[in-house]
Every structure is written in structure tokens, then in C-alpha cells.
Amino acid sequence: MSDEATSTPQDGTTNEPVWTYRGYRLKGGEFTTAMVHLYRGEVQRANVWRQRLDTTTNWAVLTTGAAISIALGNASGHHGVIILNMLLITLFLFIEARRYRYYELFASRVRLMETDFFAAMLVPPFGPAADWAESMAENLLHPHFSVSTLEALGRRFRRNYMWIYVVLAMAWVAKSALFPTTLTSWPEFVQRGAIGAIPGELVILAGILFLVVIFAVGLGTVGLQHATGEILPRYADSGVAHTLAAIFAADGVKAQDGPRAWYRGSGKRAQLMALIIGGQNSKQLSQSILSQLRRGVTKLEGTGAYTGQPHPVLLVALTVTEVNHLKTVVSEVDPTAFVIVMPAQEILGRGFQPLREEPTK
């Protein structure tokens, strides 16, 4: 939420535009410089975690090659090493999924600045999306993973690990079928699958069940679309994400026809309701909230149950990034006031989600 204002001196000339944000006044050049430094920092952090992803994948490929070489390199090698390597690959997959969630945290910020700040500079009317600054501020104040663990597992599995599991499974079958001699019957194949005291039937059944579960997780999460990915289009106006959004749209509220950055989240940031009770300067406090936070204020009449005295109650709807500013304003104007901040399920109206879309012209 940044506003652009210009100051006009006595001689009628116009100075450089100034960005005003909660009491701070930055010139356009200063604001852009700060954003450039933030962008470079987020790119660097995303690159660090991207390199760590490559490292985990390299571990998986190297250990797979070593295990297959040991198992198939000589007739005496046991195929149990392939099963152990499959468990190790699964551990690498979980480690890589955790790293991918950190990568996505920073990559989503980079993508948000690219599409809604830098790209907006290149095309008229040279303005970012209405909610991009709030989205960025909320992400910086309250960092949270933009993708779930399941989605991260599924994406890394489909990108790399699916083929590693396929190669390991084929290597295990080849080892059992060809060594020490060529297979002649199914009972012999089952017998060769045994590992020590564990019968071959149990080993084969456990292997099939394990692969079914890991492939179900990997392929079942293909419809989740919260990650930005390395190279993806700006908007998702079709496909699973768009279909689900159309199905679950709120009754009576028409879905937005215009394109929207689907990786940004819902755009409906954490919304709160503040009750400011008592105090002696409710009128001045209302004016300060209107002028500084630019949020509407509703004045209600209340009565204290203990004192029996009337107390004005101010009702203010705001987002999570404006709470600290509200507390600062109240402490400066009316420190005797009693403030209650509570979450709101949904806020509809001007400054929040519209009750209905304006007709396009």
C-alpha cells in the first residue's frame, strides 16, 4: 500500500513524486532503489536453495549408479543393495522436498516483484496490481511456505525421482531374473526375492506396495498449483486450478474475469476486525485512522457494565499488515483506549473483496 503524491511549491513547479507509506516519505528513485536491492537479495536466496536442490539430485543419481553397478557387476552381488538404495533415495526425496519448499518461499517473492512491479513499469498505466504491495508485505512480515509438503514431494518426484525409481525397479527385476542363472519359472523368481529370513513373497509384496504409494503421492498431486516453478506462465486461466476456482466460487459472487497471478495465493490476505473501546479522544482517533490508515471507521455507542458509563466503540476493518500501524496511532492519540483485534472470516466491500464485480466497459 503505497501512494504517490507530488508537492507543488509556491512558483507552481512540480517536484519529484514522493512515495508515502505510514509516515515515511520516499522519492521515486529511493523507493525503486530499495526494491532493486530487495529483488537482488531474494534472487540470491532463491539461487542458493536451487543449488541445494541440484546437490540432492546428484546424490540420488550417484548412489543409484553405484548400487546398480554393485548388484549387476558380478554374479555374487545381492539384489538387497538395490532395495537399500531405494530407501536411501526416498530419504533424499524428502530432504529435497523440504529444500524445495524453502526455494519456493523466495522464488514466489521474486516472481511477484517481476510480474507486478517491474513488468508494470513497462506498460501503461505504469502501475502495479492493487494488492501486490500488501501481498509482499504480508509475506515478509509473516513468512510461510507457499507449497505443502505433499506438493513439494510430488513436484520433485515427477521432475527427477520417478525415473530413478523406475530404473531401480528394473534393475532389481533384472538381477533376480538373470543372476546367477537365467530364470526358468515364477516360483524360482519368488525364491530369489527372499532377503535372509524374509520370504520372497513378502519382499515382492512390500516392494509393490511401496512403489504404488510413492507413485500415488507423486502423480496424485499433479493438480496442485501453488508453486511458481522455474518457468511457468504469468497466469493460469485454464486447467485444474481454473476449474476448481470456478466450481468453488462463492454463491452470488462472480469469479473475476480478468487474469490473476495464480501463484500469488488467493489475494485475500488475513483480515481482522478491531474494536477500540473507551478513551476520551474518540473523534480525534477516528480522524487519525481515516487519514493515516485510510480505513473506514464506524462509531458505536456502548455502556460499561461495571461503571454504567457510556463508552464510544470504534469498529475498524483492516488487514494483518496494518495492525502495528493501528496500535501506534491509538497509543499516540488515545493511550487510555482498550483495543481488541480479532480475526474476521470474510470482509466484503470497498477496500477489500468486492461484493460484486463492476461491469466491464
Image (cartoon, rainbow, N blue to C red):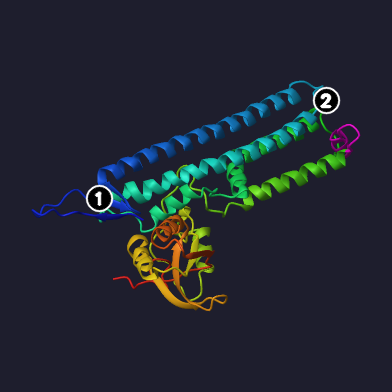
Residue position marked by numbered label 1 in the rendering: 18
Query: Looking at the picture, which amino acid does disc 2 mark?
Result: Pro
Residue reaching furthest to the right: 197
**Which residue is at the front of the view, 293 or 261?**
293
Q: What kind of element bears circle 2?
A: loop
- Let me know if residue 192 appears in the view: yes
Q: What kind of element bears circle 1?
A: strand
**In front: label 1 or label 2:** 1
Q: Is residue 49 above or below residue 289?
A: above
Quarter the C terminus occupies: bottom left
**Which residue is at the front of the view, 294 or 217?**
294
Query: Looking at the picture, which amino acid does disc 1 mark?
Result: Val
Counting other residues with Cα less than 10 Å from the Cα at mark 2, is it few (<14), some (14-19), or many (20 or more)? some
Residue at the spot x=36%, y=70% of the render? 283
Residue 46 on image: x %, y %: 48, 38
Q: Is residue 233 above or below residue 295?
A: above
Specify start and end residues of the magenta stretch as a single range. Answer: 187-199
Residue position marked by numbered label 2 in the rendering: 180
Q: Earlier in the sequence, mark 1 or mark 2?
A: 1
Residue 30 on image: x %, y %: 28, 42
Counting other residues with Cα less than 10 Å from the Cα at mark 1, is it few (<14), some (14-19), or many (20 or more)? many
Q: Is residue 194 magenta?
A: yes
Q: Is residue 341 above or below residue 157?
A: below
Q: CA distance from mark 1 to mark 2?
A: 80 Å
Residue reaching furthest to the left: 11
Going by the image, does 183 lie left or right of 326? Answer: right
Going by the image, does 80 lie left or right of 108? Answer: right
**Which residue is at the front of the view, 331 or 289?**
331
